[in-house]
């Protein structure tokens, strides 16, 4: 058994990380403090998950979120998608394994992956609206958020959602407020089967190794850890029975990277844009210096007067 | 549970059949994940639907609801045919060798002694041959054709893999695969645990479903051992406690029974209770019955219960019928014979079958009292909610009184888990508004009734007037006071007969356990099996020491487990006949030459010699029973019977409709669909979803978000046949009612081939109604039949017939 | 050259005098133009604030990031409609003519201010037409891409991949239109006497003679034909 989630200390504990531990800050340049904090990670073992949604309920409760009561829409996935109030969501997929022709009910807990190289942060135009702590947690700072939705475009996992109420972006915080005081994320704490465990990233990888061995012994030859290198690895990882085809888990991307379109938009476009505008302006100034103003001459006026017959009056 | 939740981590094979533990017991399910993760245990799920449990299973086999006995008899047959038997265990610890009376027989679905007019058996032939010494006769060689083993072998021979597949719809290869996995556990060093609940109980032969698996577990040698057992996953967080304290109308606390009309006096009553041993040297624990009973009476009536008045035996009601179960109560209500009803933490309009009948019955009451923290449908049965509750208030004269109570999180006390653990809990919040604890409300009712009787007299006021009520605050007995009564205390000093100066028991002290209880009135005890929970050492239920020597999963110092803090019952069977553990790596108890020692409290006298006394001390034989004698109303061996509403006739006994001794009220028979009725061609079942707890979490916003709206589940094949769209609306109806539901077209339900015929399954979650935060919907019980199990009257919620058609949704 | 003098628009007119004055824009046209101009400037400022962190401070002009984000697209809508007004007014005069080709080929002379080496022009020269059509095209691109990324109202209608492409196109088009605008404004400044066209609505006859002689001739001719009695 993985050592269970710690219980809260009675006395208030000072936060273990904060402003000084930022390694990234949207639309800002910062000098990260060295050394880095130990990287943390949440491991979601899909093969242990029973889809009970305790995690989803815990997330709603801990974060004091008010989700709407929806309708049934042909699946146990409720609400049907992440929302500003549902920072995590159990996604259910009925999948027939083509090799064995047996049904598998794949249940994946969707939510922010806390990418090491976060596309959301890259895309965000508002200084400090998205930050990354040196332990890997990617957090949204709502005071700074302007609700532009660029983070949605930047995210390779389709995670952030903009609230219609306050026009700010919301996503899983990895319960940074809890982790800061030595707690597990609320979802991990609520999980009855230890399908969600929490610890340092190394611990999680080791623990995952054991799980993968167990799964392989049960015939899941492609069992593996989902820690996609395309985004520098993530601080939320999955143990998947079929790690070779993550897409079957309700569209988990196979090799997620920050979209090249986003890279161009947030990269070369900026430089080229400024350059082109600068050149245009400079060309004007230069031209003026060289060519001087284009003035109407007396002759021109006279010609006009002649044409109109003004000269005759 | 014979074992405990934490013990499941010790198993090699988990069989979830007749339940859906991941869905209905997510927290307990962690021990299954634990067994899988750390022991490499396998999980098999057998269920009509591919469930959340199946989602994490190693193997899933479908089964048509109501056919588990055929399946399990088939597994027993497989084990016998393929020598997958734990022989030493079977020979030493079961009644395999016992000889059965010659008059006993079975044919075409019926045992000897059936009386069709009474729908009952004369069970006198269902017993052992008794030798001249007064003991049951046995043939240790198992050669005698009348020995239980040979009768069993013949009885299950019919259930070949082909026959099983024909009846159950389980493909033969899948059935055989399950057999193979189960068969491996016949080894003394491999155990299997059975986790079950309503998929087995909620049938007209529910008790026999469970019994069949118990027999299989005995054959595999899995009872009494770590990682084995028959593990009933109980329902409400304290339903185990409620059952222990007399949920059944024919019981008093600790599974003692109420007298019947045929037992008008104490000696007659006792004559059929303190069983004599059926084998030499045997210990029959029920011989202590009188101690428990008398102590109970003393707790109830204190000084008014004396040896002279047979400890107030008179005060107990005498049953005129076998039981006043809920079905009977509503039947009586409907007939106008029951006029007042108190619903305490119960929402029968939602929970019991055939809502239309229930609503009619409630409307005939003069008085309905509801004690509940929340608004319930039952409290609002008279209110018109359009199609969802088409009541006509003007026509209903019932007076309804709602008394708001606290809920579990607002009061203190013990909850008893499925594993028999009494765990004390403390309030997490204070009750809102005018809510009062159940105890306070009941104390008020009690005190006022007492006052009325005192003033006005009555037919027989003694039982009430003399009821002992010694609480510090008579208006609100404290949980501690009540717990202490349950544990039992000494009424008057008991001295050592050899040394009168030595007090064995001192008046006013808590007893240390039920071993101290006496039948002379010197002790009092509310529930003998709980004795030991609150002793002079304090409240043992409040213990939170999670040390676990040997990592056995016993956690002996965590809370209190009845009986006697024993974690695994029949644990003496974890060692062989000589007292040596079957499996050294999983040892629990062993005989050290002089006494039983180990990690658990022995379920036997600590010095009882292993070869002398059998492990099953609650049976006068000392062994467990593959042949149930007359203990079950519907037969000593399990037989496959179809549900009362079934898409097919019973293959093995076409003439027998349902369980031949299940109780059916006359009017209800007319409300069952015919066997294989073309009007109701689909096999329906009802069940739970993790997101909701019955009918009351729909009052909670978060739960309602997670599962907002009523739906039914059908296969892609049936959806196509009927033209029903994913997420679209359908109407589902049975002979008793009709509902509108959204439809979940799923691969998790597949049509089954039963006796050559395609049978479609319709799955119906139970959670919706017309009260609460979630969308209004219908309860499954608008559709279900009013018939109960032959032995304990649990309604047949799990197998009935319906029809379905696409529609555009309800018009309110 | 025959046929209808389409370069002449309603409101254009010549007034004799010293100097001659020529009506180039009606009051309505000028208001229309300045609404358009202000919108584009606000759009550029608000857009650039989001375009680059270095310019994020510009959000202060609008009362903060949230408001900047919220009003930018609305200003875009204003721009679109007001430009549509300009378009309806001016599109005919901006149609391509044979002399525009010649003008373009002699772009060196244009830049050097050697008006005399250029052909006689209608109301607009090829450069202005380029600005006109460039603006028209880019505004259509900007509004369509802008709507795709206007998540507050239009989030569900496109995929995230489409939005990514759209925001890139939007940013590129924004850069382009800003450049076009710079050209436009610079031209107005460089060619002295032009600003008055959009402020007072009038230019001098000399200005018209020098830069748009054909247009001036048409105006004069039209007046003659209209009032033969004079
Ligand atoms: N979330 C949640 N948990 C609960 C409850 C709740 O309401 N919600 N209720 C609690 C209570 S009171 C109880 S009693 C327990 C009940 O716990 P369970 O018995 O596990 O729950 P059910 O969902 O009623 O039924 C279990 C399964 O039986 C299957 N089944 C139906 N008929 C048959 C059959 O003939 N054979 C076999 N093999 N399977 C069959 C159904 O498909 C279903 O998957 O749950 C408790 N836990
Ligand atoms: N078709 C079909 N029907 C079924 C079943 C099925 O599987 N299928 N399952 C059956 C089973 S196993 C069960 S257990 C029943 C469940 O049926 P019920 O027990 O009637 O269902 P609950 O909704 O749990 O009702 C319990 C009530 O207790 C109240 N309550 C909670 N705490 C307290 C308290 O401290 N004091 C008091 N006084 N009240 C309290 C709750 O508010 C709630 O209204 O349904 C049965 N009906
Ligand atoms: C500060 C900014 C601007 C200034 C100083 C300015 C100035 C002028 C001037 C002086 C003219 C008259 C030119 C002539 O008649 O030859 C003109 C015309 C015009 N301007 Fe602007 N302008 C500005 C911004 C804009 C913007 C943002 C747009 C459109 C998006 C625009 C569209 C036009 C159009 C369509 C004409 C008519 C000429 C044509 O059709 O080619 N202007 N502008
Ligand atoms: C015509 C209608 C237009 C619409 C509907 C529109 C809409 C948008 C929207 C929705 C955004 C995202 C930020 C936000 O929500 O505020 C945006 C960004 C932007 N817009 Fe526009 N816009 C329009 C026109 C313009 C114009 C004319 C310009 C240029 C002058 C412009 C320049 C920009 C820039 C530079 C950005 C930021 C791009 C980036 O961050 O890379 N927009 N626009
Ligand atoms: S919506 Fe997203 S990208 Fe825009 S400011 Fe807020 S966090 Fe940054
Ligand atoms: S998953 Fe998306 S939202 Fe989360 S850190 Fe990565 S890019 Fe940002
Ligand atoms: S880590 Fe916290 S915020 Fe994230 S899903 Fe879990 S409970 Fe929700
Ligand atoms: S709480 Fe755990 S088991 Fe339940 S759905 Fe969430 S991850 Fe799965
Ligand atoms: S009642 Fe609550 S704590 Fe208990 S098993 Fe169910 S979900 Fe878990
Ligand atoms: Mo239950």
Image (spheres, coloured by chain):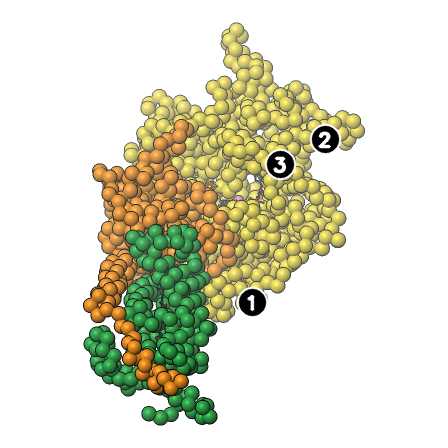
Chain colours: A orange, B yellow, C green
Asked where in the image residue B658 lies, by quadrant, the reply is bottom right
Depth check, mark 3 against mark 1: the one in front is 3
Is label 2 in contact with label 1 (beta carbons under 8 Å)? no
Label 3 to label 1, Cα distance in Å? 44 Å
* Marking on residue B433: 3
Q: Nearer the viewer, residue A144 or B802?
A: A144
Residue depicted at x 62% and y 49%: B377
| Marks 3 & 1 on one chain | yes
Q: Chain of mark 3?
A: B
Label 3–label 2 contact, CB within 8 A = no
Give the residue displayed 32% in from the left and 29% down from the top. Answer: B550
Mark 1 falls on what kind of element?
A: strand
**Secondary structure under badge 3?**
loop
Give the residue at the far front of this rendering: A313
Whether label 3 lies within 8 Å of ligand 2 gets the answer: no
**Looking at the image, do the residues carrying marks 3 and 1 touch, with CB atoms under 8 Å apart?**
no
- What mark, if any, has residue B449 been given in the picture? 2
Does C104 sit left or right of B363 as displayed? left
Distance in Å between CA atoms under marks 2 and 1: 53 Å
Compare residues A100 and A111 and report the one nearer the observer.
A111
For residue B807, the mark is 1
Q: Nearer the viewer, mark 3 or mark 2?
A: 3
Location of residue B480 in the rendering, given as x and y in whole percent from the top left corner: 55, 25
Q: Earlier in the sequence, mark 2 or mark 1?
A: 2
Q: Nearer the viewer, residue C156 or A45?
A: C156
- Residue A173, given in percent of the width and then of the height, sits at 37, 45
Instruction: Please tell me which residue is depicted at 44% across the width and 75% down the height of the picture.
Output: C26
């Amino acid at each position: 058994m993985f050592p269970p989630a710690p219980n809260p200390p009675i006395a208030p504990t000072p936060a273990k990380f904060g402003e000084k531990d930022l390694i990234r800050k949207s639309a800002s340049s910062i000098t990260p403090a060295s050394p880095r904090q130990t990287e943390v990670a949440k491991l979601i073992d899909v093969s242990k998950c029973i889809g009970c949604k305790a995690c989803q309920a815990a997330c709603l409760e801990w974060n004091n979120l008010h989700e709407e009561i929806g309708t049934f829409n042909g699946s146990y996935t409720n609400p049907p998608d992440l929302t500003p109030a549902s920072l995590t969501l159990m996604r259910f997929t009925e999948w027939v394994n083509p090799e064995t022709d047996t049904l598998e009910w794949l249940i994946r807990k969707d939510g922010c992956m806390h990418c090491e190289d976060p596309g959301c942060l890259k895309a965000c135009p508002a200084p400090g609206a998205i930050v990354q702590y040196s332990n890997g947690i990617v957090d949204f700072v709502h005071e700074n958020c302007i609700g532009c939705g660029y983070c949605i475009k930047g995210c390779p996992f389709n995670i952030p959602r903009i609230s219609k109420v306050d026009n700010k972006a919301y996503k899983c915080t990895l319960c940074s407020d809890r982790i800061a005081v030595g707690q597990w994320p609320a979802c991990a704490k609520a999980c009855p089967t230890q399908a969600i465990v929490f610890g340092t990233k190394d611990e999680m990888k080791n623990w995952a190794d054991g799980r993968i061995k167990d799964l392989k012994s049960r015939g899941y030859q492609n069992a593996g850890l989902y820690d996609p290198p395309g985004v520098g690895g993530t601080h939320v990882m999955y143990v998947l029975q079929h790690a070779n085809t993550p897409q079957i888990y309700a569209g988990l991307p196979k090799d997620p990277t920050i979209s090249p379109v986003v890279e161009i938009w947030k990269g070369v476009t900026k430089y080229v844009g400024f350059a082109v505008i600068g050149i245009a302006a400079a060309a004007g100034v230069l031209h003026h210096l060289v060519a001087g103003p284009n003035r109407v001459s007396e002759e021109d006026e006279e010609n006009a007067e002649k044409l109109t017959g003004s000269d005759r009056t | 549970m014979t074992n405990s939740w934490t013990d499941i981590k010790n198993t090699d094979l988990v069989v979830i059949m007749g339940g859906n533990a991941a869905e209905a017991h997510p927290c307990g399910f962690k021990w299954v994940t634990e067994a899988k993760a750390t022991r490499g245990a396998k999980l098999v799920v057998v269920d009509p639907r591919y469930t959340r449990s199946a989602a994490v299973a190693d193997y899933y086999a479908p089964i048509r609801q109501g056919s588990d006995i055929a399946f399990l008899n088939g597994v027993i047959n497989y084990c016998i045919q393929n020598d997958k038997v734990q022989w030493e265990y079977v020979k030493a610890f079961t009644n395999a060798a016992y000889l059965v009376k010659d008059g006993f027989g079975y044919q075409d679905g019926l045992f000897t002694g059936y009386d069709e007019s009474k729908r009952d058996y004369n069970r006198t032939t269902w017993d052992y041959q008794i030798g001249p010494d007064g003991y049951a006769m046995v043939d240790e060689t198992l050669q005698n054709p009348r020995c239980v083993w040979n009768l069993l072998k013949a009885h299950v021979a019919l259930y070949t893999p082909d026959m099983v597949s024909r009846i159950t719809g389980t493909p033969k290869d899948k059935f055989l695969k399950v057999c193979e996995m189960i068969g491996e556990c016949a080894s003394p060093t491999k155990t299997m645990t059975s986790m079950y609940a309503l998929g087995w109980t909620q049938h007209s032969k529910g008790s026999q479903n469970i019994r069949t698996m118990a027999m299989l577990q005995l054959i595999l040698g899995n009872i009494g051992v770590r990682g084995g057992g028959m593990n009933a996953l109980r329902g409400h967080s304290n339903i185990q406690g409620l059952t222990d304290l007399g949920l059944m109308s024919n019981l008093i606390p600790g599974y003692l029974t109420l007298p019947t009309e045929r037992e008008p006096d104490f000696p007659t009553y006792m004559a059929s209770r303190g069983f004599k041993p059926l084998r030499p040297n045997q210990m029959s624990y029920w011989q202590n019955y009188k101690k428990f009973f008398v102590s109970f009476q003393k707790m109830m009536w204190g000084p008014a219960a004396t040896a002279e008045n047979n400890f107030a035996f008179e005060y107990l009601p005498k049953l005129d019928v076998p039981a006043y179960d809920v079905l009977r109560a509503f039947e009586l209500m409907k007939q106008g014979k029951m006029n007042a009803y108190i619903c305490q933490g119960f929402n029968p309009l939602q929970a019991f079958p055939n809502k239309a009948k229930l609503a009619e019955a409630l409307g005939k009451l003069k008085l309905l009292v509801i004690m509940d923290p929340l608004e319930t449908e039952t409290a609002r049965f008279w209110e018109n909610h359009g199609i969802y509750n088409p009541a006509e208030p003007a026509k209903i004269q019932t007076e309804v009184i709602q008394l708001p109570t606290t809920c579990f999180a607002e009061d203190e006390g013990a909850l008893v888990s499925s594993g028999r653990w009494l765990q004390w809990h403390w309030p997490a919040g204070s009750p809102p508004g005018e809510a009062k604890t159940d105890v306070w409300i009941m104390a008020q009712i009690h005190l006022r009734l007492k006052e009325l009787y005192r003033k006005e007299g009555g037919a027989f006021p003694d039982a009430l007037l003399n009821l002992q009520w010694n609480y510090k605050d008579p208006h609100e007995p404290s949980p501690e006071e009540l717990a202490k009564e349950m544990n039992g205390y000494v009424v008057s000093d008991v001295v050592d007969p050899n040394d009168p100066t030595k007090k064995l028991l001192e008046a006013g002290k808590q007893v240390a356990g039920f071993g101290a209880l006496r039948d002379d009135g010197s002790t009092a005890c509310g529930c003998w099996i709980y004795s030991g929970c609150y002793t002079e050492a304090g409240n043992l239920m409040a213990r939170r020491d999670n040390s676990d020597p040997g990592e056995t999963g016993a956690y002996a110092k965590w809370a209190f487990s009845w009986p006697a803090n024993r974690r695994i019952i029949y644990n003496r069977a974890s060692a062989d006949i000589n007292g040596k553990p079957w499996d050294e790596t999983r040892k629990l108890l062993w005989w050290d030459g002089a006494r039983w020692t180990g990690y658990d409290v022995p379920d036997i006298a600590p010095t009882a010699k292993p070869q002398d006394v059998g492990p099953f001390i609650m049976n006068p034989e000392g062994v467990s029973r593959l042949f149930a004698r007359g203990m079950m109303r519907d037969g000593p061996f399990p037989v496959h019977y179809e549900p009362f509403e079934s898409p097919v006739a019973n293959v093995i006994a076409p003439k027998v409709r349902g369980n031949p001794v299940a109780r059916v009220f006359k009017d209800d028979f007319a409300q069952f669909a015919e066997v294989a009725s073309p009007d109701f061609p689909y096999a329906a079942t009802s069940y739970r979803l993790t997101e909701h707890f019955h009918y009351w979490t729909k009052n909670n916003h978060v739960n309602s978000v997670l599962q907002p709206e009523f739906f039914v589940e059908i296969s892609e094949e049936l959806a196509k046949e009927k033209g029903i769209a994913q997420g679209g609306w359908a109407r589902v109806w049975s002979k008793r009612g009709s509902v509108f539901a959204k439809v979940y077209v799923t691969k998790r339900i597949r049509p089954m081939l039963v006796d050559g015929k395609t049978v479609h399954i319709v799955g119906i979650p139970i959670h919706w109604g017309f009260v609460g935060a979630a969308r209004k919907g219908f309860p499954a019980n608008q559709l279900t039949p009013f018939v109960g199990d032959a032995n304990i009257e649990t309604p047949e919620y799990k197998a009935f017939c319906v029809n379905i058609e696409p529609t555009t949704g309800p018009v309110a | 050259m025959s046929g209808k003098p389409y370069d002449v628009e309603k409101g254009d007119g010549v007034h004799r005098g010293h100097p001659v004055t020529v009506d180039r824009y009606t009051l309505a046209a000028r208001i229309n133009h300045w609404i358009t101009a202000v919108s584009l400037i606000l759009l550029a400022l608000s857009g650039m604030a989001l375009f680059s962190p270095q310019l994020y401070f510009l959000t202060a002009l609008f009362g903060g990031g949230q408001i900047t984000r919220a009003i930018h697209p609305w200003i875009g809508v204003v721009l679109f409609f007001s430009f549509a007004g300009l378009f309806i007014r001016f599109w005919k005069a901006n149609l391509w003519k044979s002399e525009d080709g010649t003008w373009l080929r002699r772009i060196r002379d244009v830049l050097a201010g050697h008006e005399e080496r250029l052909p006689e022009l209608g109301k607009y020269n090829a450069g202005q037409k380029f600005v006109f059509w460039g603006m028209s095209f880019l505004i259509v691109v900007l509004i369509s891409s802008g709507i795709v990324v206007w998540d507050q109202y239009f989030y569900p209608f496109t995929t995230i991949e489409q939005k990514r492409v759209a925001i890139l196109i939007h940013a590129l088009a924004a850069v382009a239109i800003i450049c076009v605008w710079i050209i436009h404004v610079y031209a107005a400044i460089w060619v002295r006497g032009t600003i008055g066209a959009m402020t007072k609505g009038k230019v001098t006859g000399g200005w018209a003679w020098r830069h748009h002689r054909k247009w001036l001739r048409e105006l004069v001719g039209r007046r003659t034909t209209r009032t033969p009695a004079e």
